[in-house]
Amino acid sequence: MSLRHLNVLAEDDDDPMLSAVNLVDVFLVLVVALLTAVAVQTQTSANESVTIIRNPGQPDMEVVVREQGKEVRFKGAGSAAQGQGVRAGVAYKLEDGNIVYIPESGSAPASASAGGAGGAATAAPAKP
């Protein structure tokens, strides 16, 4: 009786499908972990601000700015900017690398300060 009982146990251990099923389970767990990591990375990179300069110094230079999922492209005209204007303010570079812009008080017309602080005498720090 004991020989017959040993043969039954030996047949169950030789089944190659048991190890294949275990490997499939391990790979499923790895795939789910990788998909979760990709989803988290995509979500965090969509909220970042990125500035890309393509072909710097060339006539077809392009600046691409991505902020909060929106993309704005600025294309160069191939020549230096020309026109008339007025002095809008003064920019200073600090020792720590920050740049501070101080607009002129009252001398710049309203159209020249449309993108700025509106002629206020406060400093606007900016990273280089």
Image (tube, rainbow, N blue to C red):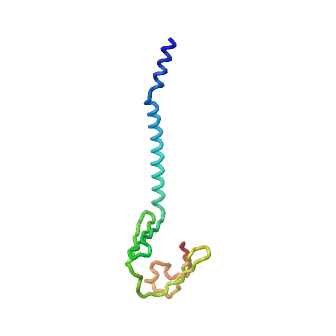
| Relative depth, front residue between 39 and 2 | 2
| Relative depth, front residue between 85 and 110 | 85
| Relative depth, front residue between 85 and 23 | 23
Q: Is residue 82 left or right of residue 87?
A: left
- Establish if 101 lies above or below 11: below
* Residue 73: percent from left, percent from top: 40, 70
* Residue 2: percent from left, percent from top: 52, 13
Q: Is residue 100 left or right of residue 59?
A: right
- Establish if 8 lies above or below 94: above
Give the residue at x 46% y 22%: 11
The number of numbered badges drawn on the structure is: 0
Give the residue at x 47% y 19%: 8
* Residue 83: percent from left, percent from top: 41, 86
Give the residue at x 41% y 85%: 82
* Residue 6: percent from left, percent from top: 50, 17
Q: Is residue 126 left or right of residue 77?
A: right
- Establish if 13 lies above or below 96: above
Residue extending farthest top? 1
Give the residue at x 47% y 61%: 47
